[in-house]
Amino acid sequence: MATTRRDFIRSAAGIGAATALGGCATRGGLFGGCGGAPMHGFAAPAIPHIRLGVVGMGSRGCGIVGRACNLPGITVTAICDNVPEKIERAKGILAKRNKPAPKEYLGDEAWRRLCEDPDVDVVYNTTPWALHVPVQLAAMRGGKHVFTEVPSAFTVDECWELVETSEATRRHCMQLENCCYGEIEMLTFNLAKLGLLGELVHGEGAYIHDLRHMCETEWPGCECWRFDENRDHGGNRYPTHGLVPLCLTFDVNRGDRLDYLVSLESNQVNFSAFMRARLKADNPRRQSKVKMADMNSTLIKTANGRSLLIQHDVSSPRPYSRIQLVTGTKGAVCDYPYRIVFEENPGSGAHKWYDEKKANEIREKYRHPLWKTVGELAKRVGGHGGMDFIMDARWSYCLRLGLPLDMDVYDLAATSCLCELTEISADNHSRPCDIPDFTRGAWRTAKPMEVVDIDLGKMGLKDENVKNADGQITV
């Protein structure tokens, strides 16, 4: 039976009064009862040459400007920010590659005008988090497809509004979850689709990244919004890097769905200690009480009985990791570092990971087709080891040929809603929270994602035209 938003709100009584739900229950209108998930498998009319508008010219915005210079069939026609120096930096990247000068939208509300620009087909949203949802809504209502950095929404109610708007406007609304295109994530997906891991049972993902320097960093025009989010919110405020690749591998929204979660968090020590050690005595931020725990651990149960563990830690002195562990009835694969093992004979067991030589042989043999086709070009361009370029190459390829995208608005909603739900659970003694079925039951019949690739000939992507792009992020 499909779950409506009203059903979800009623079920939330199990975690306390409706007032504890915050934004979950605030919207008056429901989704209108339309049949489940009309954007599943949606393919928009082909756009042979994509006119791209980029909102937010920070590191991520300038990153896509540089990568777009390497992608045939894309022209950056508009850029937007509220800081003139950032606009100039983006223009310089385009000028260096002899690309046409874009329209410039400068000011706090200038993104609204870019979303209405008739010379823009796709809006690429790399703004601070508070603008993620407003820009997406404005873009779709302005007739544009929209791609947004993660997380793309922060409350259940916002997720429903994005779902409903995408359905009503028939415009793509995709979360830019680049980690889905990481080499080991795609290797794991390929192994699962080939049946080499057997029946999938459990997955683990994370965002573990020491970001305490946010306490003392200011960005022109927007101050330290990322630190402020962690100061004001608990739970897992950044769940998608670890979660979304697992969702694609486990066929979430395409044969399974996220059912409910429980979220538990540690105390908060590291941000406070860092601020005392690094900030001057008169800095008001030094006295801030940070709500975000050092470690949040969230357990998710899927409708088909699988389990997922998602962790978030941005304040511990600990090396970067997304974990990315998938276990099945025939073996397991994990990253950070990369490890793999198969149970080679039923019942024989698998008590230690393969040695490095054998693990790398499997890595080469079962490398995902996208990494075989585009991987070396992507590493040359840069951007998180190449996965940013593969992500952009793939969505642009799909739009130009009129193909369905790899991810849709339901994937965005099912994963971004954890920002609110994990905080609710953690604030209420880790009580269970139901996760809404944004597909309204269509997950049961939706086709799983296939092992996809790119035809370089159809795309017009040539080796000699691909160059390193300025300003790409490595971690």
Image (spheres, rainbow, N blue to C red):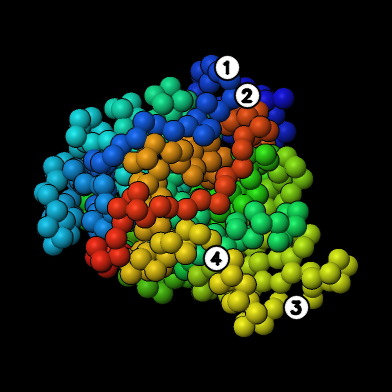
Label at residue 352: 3
Badge 1, how many Cα within 10 Å: few under 14, some, many 20+? Answer: few
Earlier sequence position, callout 2 versus callout 3: 2
Quadrant of the rendered image containing residue 255: top right
Q: Position of residue 290 (x, y in %)?
A: 48, 57
Closer-to-camera residue (329/156): 329
Dot in front, 4 or 1: 4
Dot 1 amino acid type: Gly
Label at residue 4: 2
Q: Secondary structure at mark 4?
A: loop
Dot in front, 4 or 2: 4
Q: Is residue 51 left or right of residue 296?
A: left
Q: Which residue is mark 4?
A: 367
Q: CA distance from mark 4 to mark 2?
A: 40 Å
Q: Which residue is mark 1?
A: 33
Q: Secondary structure at mark 3?
A: loop
Q: CA distance from mark 3 to mark 4?
A: 22 Å
Earlier sequence position, callout 4 versus callout 2: 2
Earlier sequence position, callout 3 versus callout 4: 3
Q: Secondary structure at mark 2?
A: loop
